[in-house]
Image: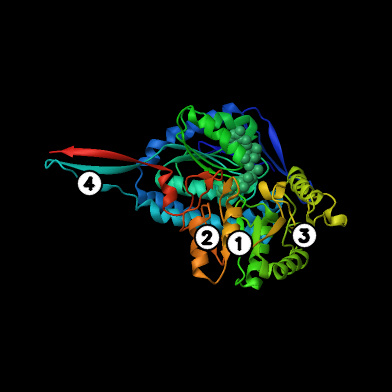
Amino acid sequence: MATSMLIAGETVGAKSGKTLEVRNPANGEVVDTVPKGSLADVDAAVDAAAKAFPAWASLSGAKRAQLMHEAARKVKAAVPEIAKLLTLEQGKPLAHAVLEASRVSENLDYYAGLADKLRGDYVPLEDANKFGLTLRRPVGVVVAITPWNFPLTLMANKVAPALAAGCTVVLKPASTTPLATQRTIEIINSVGLPAGVLNTVHGPGGEIGDALVSHKKVNKIAFTGQTETGKRIMQLAAQNVTRVTLELGGSDPMIVCDDADIRRATAATAIGRFFNAGQACLAVKRVYLFEAIAQEFMQKIADRAAKEWPVGDGLKEGVKMGPLHTERQRAEVEAQVADAVKRGAKVLAGGKRPEGKEFEKGWFMEATVLTDVPEDSRMATEEVFGPALPVFIVKDLDEAIAKSNASVYGLGSSIWTKDLAKARKAAEQIEAGYTWVNDIQVAYDQLPFGGAKQSGFGKEHGIEALDGYLEKKSVVLAY
Ligand code: NDP
C-alpha cells in the first residue's frame, strides 16, 4: 500500500516518483510510504488551489456549510480507521487517537455552522447622500503547515475555518505523520468538493517549505510548529507580504496556591504533562508550588507519575503513554533532564527509559518529575516537549507570576486556588493566550486560542479564527 497526495481532485504520486517512508515510533517498522513532493508538485498544488478559488469563494455559504457537515459525518464514521493509522505513525495510545480523530468532525461541524453566517456591516456616514458598507471576502489560497504531535486536530483548526470562509487550501503535514491526515483529507474531499479546493503536498519542510511559503499565488500561511521554524516562515512571508498565523512553542506555567485542591490539581498536572507523552504545545511544563502544600503535592505527583502512566505500544490495551515520536525527540528530552540533574536537580519519579524487550525498538521514556531544578537550566528556560516535569517552590503569588512570565513563551497557563482575587490577578497578569482556573488545557472550539510573545500570533478556534481567512473591505455608496 502507498499513500498519495491530493492535487486538483486527483490522488497522485510525486512527479519525481520519489517516496518517503513513514515509521512506527513504537517499533521502528515501516507503516507506509508517501510521495516525496518537490517544487513541481508544490506548483501544481498551488496552481490547482488558485484555479479553484473564484468558484469556491462565490459559492453560497449555505452550500459550503452543507458540504462541510457532510464531510463531518463521513469523517466521524471513519474514526476507527483514521485513529489506527494515527497511532501507527505517531505513537499515541489508540483511545487518545480516537479522541483526536473525533475532534476533526466536531471542528468541521462548528465551522460549517458559521459558513452561512458571515456578513459585513452597514455604516452610516457624515455625508447625507452616502453610506458605507463593509464586505468580508476570503483571502484566497491558504498554505497550511502542521506538526506531528496532533496532526489531525491542528489540520482541522486550519482547514475547517479556511473552507468555511471560502478559501482554497494546500496542506503540508509533517513528514513523519502524513498518513491519517491524508486519509482524512481524502474523506473530506469525497463529499463533492470542487477539484482543487483542498490539496495536499508531502515532503520535507526543509526542502519544499520555502517554496510553499514564498509562492506568489499564496495569500495566507497558517502554521503550527516550532518557534524557530515560525521565525523563518515570517521572514519568507514578508517577501510577498503574505498573511501569517503562527501557533508556535510554549512552556506553560501552573501555579498551585496553598488553598488548592491537591488531589484534583495533581490529577490534572499528570494529564497536563504526560498526555501525548508530553508532546503538546498546551501542556503543564513548569509547576510553581506555594510552600505550605509543596511536599504533599510533590509526593502525590510523583506517585501518579510512577503508578498511573503505563508506557507501551499505543495499540496495546491499558497503555496511557506511547513512545516519544522520534529518536531525536527522546534524545532532546533526555538531554534536558540530564542537564538539570547535573546541576543538582532531584528525580522524584522516572528519569529513565523503561526496561524490557517490548521497549527495545521504540523511543520510550518513563513519566518523569524533578525538583530543585535550577532556574537557568534547560528545563526551566526551554520548551520541554516530552514527559518530564520540573516543580519549583515559591513564597507567594507575586513570585509565582513573575517566574511564570520569565519565559520567551506565552501560550497557556493555569492557577489552582479557591480565592477569586488570586485567580483574577493571575488571569490579568500572566502573559499568555489562555489561563485556566482550577482546570487544565482543554482548548474549546468556542474560545479563541493563540499565543502571546514567541508563542506566535493570530487565533485558531472560535469565530475569531475566521478573521484570519477573511479580509474586510470598505465600500462607499453615493446616491
Ligand atoms: P517543526 O517546526 O519542526 O515542523 C512543523 C511543520 O513545519 C512540519 O510540517 C515541518 O515539515 C514543517 N517545516 C519544517 N521546516 C520548514 C520550513 N523551513 N518551511 C516550512 N515548513 C517547514 O515543528 P514540530 O513538528 O517539531 O512540532 C513541534 C512544535 O510545534 C513544538 O514547538 C510545539 O510547541 C509546537 N506546537 C505548537 C502548537 C500551538 O498551537 N501553538 C500546537 C502544537 C505544537 P517536516 O515534518 O517535513 O520537517
Name the residue beneath numbered marker 2.
426
Q: Callout 4, which amino acid?
A: Val
Q: Please say whether residue 78 is visible from this viewpoint.
A: no
Which quadrant of the structure image shows residue 293?
bottom right
Residue nearest the observer in this picture, 391 or 272 = 391
Name the residue beneath numbered marker 3.
311
Of labels 2 and 4, the one closer to you: 2
Name the residue beneath numbered marker 4.
123
Sequence-wise, which precedes: disc 4 or disc 3? 4
Give me the C-alpha separation between circle 3 and circle 1.
Answer: 27 Å
Give me the C-alpha separation between circle 2 and circle 4.
Answer: 39 Å
Provide the secondary structure element on which disc 2 rests. helix
Sequence-wise, which precedes: disc 3 or disc 1? 1
Sequence-wise, which precedes: disc 2 or disc 4? 4
Give me the C-alpha separation between circle 2 and circle 3.
Answer: 34 Å
Q: Residues within 10 Å of mark 3 (few under 14, many from 20)?
A: many
Give me the C-alpha separation between circle 1 and circle 4.
Answer: 46 Å
Sequence-wise, which precedes: disc 1 or disc 4? 4
Check if mark 4's residue and mark 3's residue have beta carbons within 8 Å.
no
Which quadrant of the structure image shows residue 97?
bottom right
Of labels 4 and 3, the one closer to you: 4
Q: Give how far across and how far down residue 226 sits, in percent.
A: 62, 42
Q: Is residue 120 left or right of residue 292?
A: left
Quadrant in which the N terminus appears: top right
Residue plotted at (59% across, 27% down)? 39
Name the residue beneath numbered marker 1.
255
Check if mark 1's residue and mark 2's residue have beta carbons within 8 Å.
yes
